[in-house]
Amino acid sequence: MKAEKETKKKTQRIHVPSLRFRYRMILYLLTIVCIALSLWHVAADCFPYVAGITVYVLAAVTLTASCYYIVVHIRHDIREVIKPAIAANPYTNKVTTDYRLRTILFAVPGMVSNIIFALFNGMIGITSHSAWFGTLSAYYILLSIMRMGIVRQERNIAVIKEKKEHMCRELSVYRRNSVLFILMAIVLAGAVILLEYSKGGKNYPGFTIYAVAAYTFYKITMSTIHVIKVAKRKSPLLSITRRIGYIDACVSILILQTAMFASFAEGEEGFVKLMNGITGAVVCVMVLGFGIWGICSSQSQRYV
């Protein structure tokens, strides 16, 4: 009996009533009003103590309820509307179901952005005579070459039906990009040396640094997940593609760090140099390690 009761308790869920569209809109409007009042009270201290506490509680409750209904209806729309629409189209359905195709397709926007960054940093480096921007341009050029080569080689490899030849071609791509990782480590080492001599770093105006920080941490999180997931695929080409994305995210962390120090660490030159040196050294060693490991493992075909 006790086991049955425990099973029933586990299967029971708290039922939150559904709301019609007009009531949800009222809830969202009330949430905005409560949040505005709470922020106004924080800034101007315009309410008595009890009224202020009440406003805070209402803001918290309405915000929680609004977030719940927003998430529920987004999930409902994805399940009932978006997924069937994707499945109905043969092209979008192939992208969502074919992991290999999806990985290569998503490498294309990264390749384009790398080319743009390479040109942008190269122009700034030439006009301002900055070696720092020159090294960044060289780094983005290497990223562009690596991603461009992978996309081009995937088109050639996709038509190969024989499994052994298919794997040999993938290992060849894996080996070449591992060599480029070693070259990239040298370029990044030069960038870190320039940082140590205060001849580099980026800065972002105003509050844009927070948006850049949020995107950078999102990128490092997702790239880490992709590197872990792709190991199960046993594909050298997909593995090296995800590692390129991971290195790109790690270097973005280093660049973001220089921007954060430029904005918030004024007068702490010694600490800034120490932290930039440590982070830069870690990134360089990581890139070098990926390159050496890739070359060695490709020889024995132990690529993951």
Image: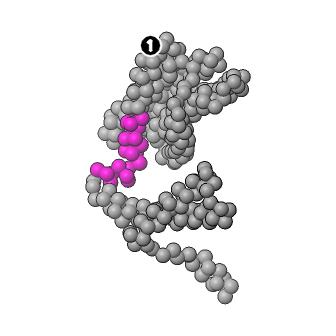
Residue at 51%, 14% (x, y): give it: 130
123 vs 109, nearest the viewer: 123
Residue located 51% across and 74% down the image: 16
Which secondary structure dominates the residues rendered in magenta?
A: helix
In the figure, 76 relative to 215: above or below?
Answer: below
Which residues fall within the magenta stretch? Answer: 91-111
Q: Is residue 210 above or below residue 9?
A: above
Question: Which quarter of the image is occupied by the C terminus?
Answer: top right
- Judged from the image, the secondary structure of the residue bearing numbered disc 1 is helix
Mark 1 neighbour density, 10 Å: few (under 14) some (14–19) many (20 or more): few
**In this rendering, position of residue 108 left or right of residue 302:** left
Instruction: Tell me what residue is drawn at x 53 percent, y 34 percent.
Output: 206
Above-or-below relation of 39 to 274: below
Where residue 227 appears, x then y in whole percent? 53, 42
- Figure quadrant of residue 89: bottom left
**Amino acid carrying mark 1 in the image:** Thr
Drawn side of residue 257 relative to residue 142, left or right: right
Q: Quadrant of residue 237?
A: top left
Count of labels in the image: 1
The single residue placed furthest to the bottom in the displayed view is: 1
In this rendering, position of residue 20 left or right of residue 205:
left
Q: Which residue is mark 1?
A: 127
From the top left corner, tell me how far across and down residue 97 is, in percent: 38, 53
Viewer-proximal residue among 164 and 304: 304
Say if residue 294 shows up in the picture: no
**Residue 249 inside the magenta-drawn segment:** no
Query: Magenta span has 96?
Result: yes
Identified at 60% across, 50% down, the residue is 43
Vertical comparison of 30 with 252: above or below = below
